[in-house]
Image (tube, rainbow, N blue to C red):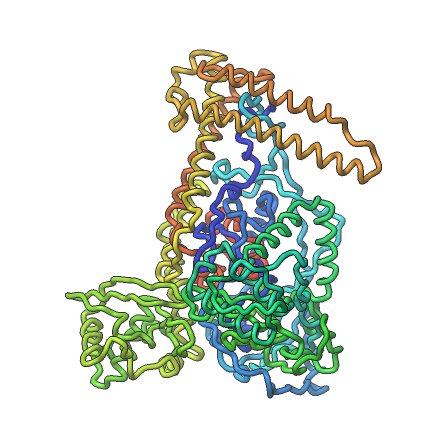
Amino acid sequence: MSSDAYMSSDDDRPLGSLQNDGKANTGRGSANGYAKEEASDSPMSEDEDMPLSQVAAPKSEPVTPAKSLRRKRAAALDSSSEDDDTPLASSPVKQSATIPMPGTSKASTANGHKTVKAESDDKRSSTTAKKKRASTKKGPPQKKLKREDHDTSEPPASEDEESTPVKKDKVSRKRKPKVKEETDAEVEDAGKFKPTKKRAISKKVKDGADESATPQPKKKGKVKDEGEDEEEVYKWWEAQQNNDGEVKWQTLEHNGVIFPPPYEPLPSNVKMRYKGKEVDLPLESEEVAGFYAAMLETEHAQDATFNKNFFEDWLKVLQDHPPRNKIKIIKFEDCDFRPMFEHFEAEKAKKKALSTAEKKELKKQKDAFEEKYVTCLLDGRKEKVGNFRVEPPGLFRGRGDHPKKGALKFRVRPDDITINIGEGTPIPVPNMPGQWKAIVHDQTVTWLANWVENVNGNYKYVFLAAGSSLKGQSDMQKFEKARELKNHVDRIRKDYSADLRSKVMADRQRATAMYFIDKLALRAGNEKGEDEADTVGCCSLRCEHVTLEAPDFLIFDFLGKDSIRYYNRVSVDPQVFKNIKLFKDNKEDSDNLFDRVNTSLLNKHLASYMKGLTAKVFRTYNASITFQQQLDEGTPANATIQEKLNAYNHANRMVAILCNHQRSAPKTHEQSMGKMRDRLRSLKYDRMKLRHVLFNMDPKFKKQKQYADDESDLDDDWIEDHEKSLKNKEIEKAEKKFAKDNEKLVQEGNEPQPDSALQEKIEAAEAEYKRVAKERGTGKAKLKRDRPPEKIEEAVQKLDEKIKTFKLQMDDREAGKEVALGTSKINYLDPRITAAWCSVHNVPIEKIFSKTLLVKFPWAMEVDDAWKF
């Protein structure tokens, strides 16, 4: 029996392995506060509209890192989760869709971009001299950012500000050596079949903080030695900025984009059927049929709109490329795609069955091929590119109830793509035949390539990765613009409150719309075409979307962004209630509620109060200020880390509800909760067995209050099943290790282990199970090796803490099942709020921000404890 007695077989792995793996119907991420966001270098979401240009670098005063926070960050890394990308309690499954950037505008065409001339020699000399002088100085003193210097609006490309090259700093990323102590409870486990593991104990928690409630597993991978080279990090937020409001970069060199591989025909024996007969399809028609066949057992294939759009587009392809055996396809219901589906499933199974060595070799080949596309040279420094893979052809899925779901997405070719690159640099060569549509040298924008997708006519862009300097500057500027609104919001609210009674109908409607945007965080809304989803925002509300309920309630019911239903019954200002009644008089349900206001007029009015102020800035401001207030009011002072995390997630949920970041409860939610309940029972089982060991040592322990009561939820049948499951897991683990060790021995040219070695391990597990089974129901248990009672009591105490923590996690999961927290965390909540809160409350930021977000927001990690939004 192993020496970590009765501790769960999952003790040393993140609790996230038991988290819900369901997918939100909104594509926004798990409701769990620690959910892992999708990596920024994944292909762009097929439905996402991106702005034409990124906002320029902020005109900020230099910010000096807070040394105390750096120490906490370094210490937090020592005890970070076993999975670099996943916080302790996060879901192990990646989310299925990219989180959309809120308020992104449709971009205009890339043709006719203005090329900005290079600086004059005198200007370059002056700039170089300034940089040399700056590089000889030590870091600037800590200063607060000047809010009035920032502009995070999204104007046309010509109005964006410049981001000039700045200096690099070398920042040490050395980790402190891990401090290892003895395992939590050095006692043998009469109910588990695993060897003793020692856990690295983090030293980061301040005196008085409760660390035991959230044990940290050992982190995989190598830790840098003291003598290793320091990692060079470009700290743009500490460098001097020289912006002229237009030019984003001076030099840009990249290798273009990766096109998906060409279509590979199916084997000759795999054919779809029509009215029971095999159809011999040309490659062009077969490829499109395969798109549908691969989705045959998904929800999409059960959707009438999806099926209708697919079949209509496929029939168009069939007209140009009809079946070779002259079968005429007329009705969708007579098509049988199952033979193709079964072939695809078999191919998936083959890939899954590949050996570890084969999978590593394939990944190595893929990484080698993509290596040159992953980074670019921006102003002479290497930066990561985000979505450098062109979307493959397929069927458009859309979000929500999109009218075009199921439509055919064409294959993108080089002659569809415009490349933006520095003048005089080598032009990349496409990895498929063809020539680029156009080559531009536009220094006022930050995209590397763009094209127009055929389904909605939207522009798709290749940008730098989320952690790049230009993206970071844009994010920082956006939140600084929202902070600047604090200086104007009282005056704006006073004015629109007065205009609620204006005799000018246009002013009264505008004031009412501003009330909704401010109080309810509604999006401004834009007009939609007939072939687009019927989604609306504040300015495009129709009379049918708002119902009056005396004395002062309004009921909103409409489809918002991504076709997510917005339903809210809310009490409003009496004058607002009167206004809505007035606006609806003598109108049909299909008429616009605000017939004298549109988004452009509203944003123009807002900009008169503050440069760059838009409805989106209001939304960001209200989200962040609400979040800050909720954290300040709701974080318990003396609590465990998990209790603080629950408070953090509650604050995030309040913002998500405010911004209507809702989702349907995942279909696997109940299944996931069932697994968590089993996990909780397994912890209670561990505690029960340790109590029985104490009772066997000395009956006096039965009289002690903390050991007197039996654990709930543990009946005899469950205990028997649990112990049998533990035995089976141990045998499975031994078999996998045996196979892996033998595979390695063969690769090294050595003789594999005999089968008898595996049989010995299996027999040992069987014998251990029999011994544990004999103890069942006796109220007593023994260890293989004697351990002092003090060690066992310590283990019981730590299990009590684990049980308490896990119950809190279950409560948090249940509370967040219908709320998507990822969108607000990525787009609407100033990350500095989280960084400062973690520092003040001694919570490792890795429990909240995934590795992706830590890379995305490096500028936010160094604020001091006193920072407030």
User: Based on the displayed image, in which of its 4 quarters is residue 246 positioned?
Assistant: bottom right
Left or right: 632 as drawn, with respect to 443: left
Quadrant into which the C terminus falls: bottom left
Left or right: 265 as drawn, with respect to 106: right
**Residue projecting furthest to the left:** 551
Can residue 562 be seen from the camera position used here? Answer: no
Q: Where is residue 103 shown, x and y percent of the image?
A: 44, 71
Q: Where is residue 304 shown, x and y percent of the image?
A: 42, 64
Q: On screen, 186 above or below 571?
A: above
Is 113 or 430 nearer to us in this picture?
430
Q: On screen, 456 above or below 237?
A: below
Left or right: 653 as drawn, with respect to 324: left
Please give the name of the residue rendered at 71% of the width and 58% of the height, measured from the top-left corner: 366
Q: Where is residue 814 shown, x and y percent of the image?
A: 38, 45
Q: Where is residue 231 shown, x and y percent of the image?
A: 70, 57
> How many numbered marks appear?
0
Please give the name of the residue rendered at 68% of the width and 85% of the height, measured from the top-left corner: 119
Quadrant into which the N terminus falls: top right
Left or right: 486 as drawn, with respect to 586: right
Please give the name of the residue rendered at 61% of the width and 39% of the height, measured from the top-left corner: 218
**Residue projecting furthest to the right:** 749
Is 94 or 278 nearer to us in this picture?
278
Is 81 or 18 nearer to us in this picture?
18
Q: On screen, 238 above or below 809?
A: below
Can residue 654 be seen from the camera position used here? Answer: yes
Please give the name of the residue rendered at 61% of the width and 77% of the height, measured from the top-left corner: 248
